[in-house]
Image (cartoon, grey):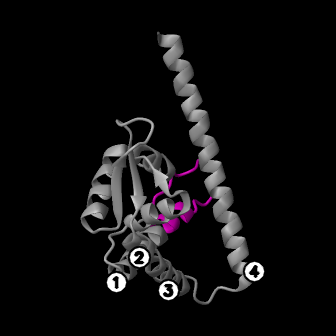
Amino acid sequence: MAKYFIETDDGEVPKFILAALQNAARLARTHTARHLLETGLYAGQETIIALLAEHETLSPSQIAKHIGVRPPTITKSIGRLIEQGFVTKSTGYSDGRQVQVELTEAGRDILKKVRKAAKKAEKQALKGFSSSQLKQFESALTQLSDNLIQRDEKAQKKAAKRALEDS
């Protein structure tokens, strides 16, 4: 496993938690992708399917925003899902220029298989953890995510402030 860290001057022993997290996330994604192959979906497509099941109809830019990727990435994924028959694309009712994406019947059917594949992958990944360990792990991951989100928000505000000062 790669070990990424910044050495400290205060003699503190560096921890490799983020490196371990990145490695575990990569392994989990690969493991989940293997289970998804049984459904005919590629990694990442299950997220779009689940999102559309929850919201029924979304624009490609809304999907991109929910997932946290750039619109061109979503456009390619949506194209694949259309070819596979899992989603359809149509123009908006109020604005003919606005494209909307929604699940087909096959897309709704595949959602059950996606959930089953995700459950199998998660069961394997979490084998041997006690209930209390899982609660602590989830809490720690939530805190880690919150810390990184706060850091990103602060950095964005600083960048916006600098941009205003430069103009």
Question: Between 124 and 86, which is closer to the camera in this rendering?
Answer: 86
Q: Nearer the viewer, mark 1 or mark 4?
A: 1
The residue sitting at 68% across, 77% down in the picture is 134
4 or 3: tag closer to the N-terminus: 3
Kind of residue at disc 4: Ser
Number of the label disc, if any, that sits on residue 38: 1
What secondary structure prevails in the magenta region?
A: loop
What is the CA distance from the residue labelled 3 to the residue labelled 2?
15 Å
Residue 105 colored in magenta in the image: no
Question: Between 80 and 108, which is closer to the camera in this rendering?
Answer: 108
Residues drawn in magenta = 4-22
Asked if residue 12 lies left or right of residue 106, the reply is right
The residue sitting at 55% across, 61% down in the picture is 54
Task: Give the structural element (helix, strand or loop) at label 1.
Answer: loop
Whether residue 11 is visible to the viewer of this picture, yes or no, is no
Task: Give the structural element (helix, strand or loop) at label 2.
Answer: helix
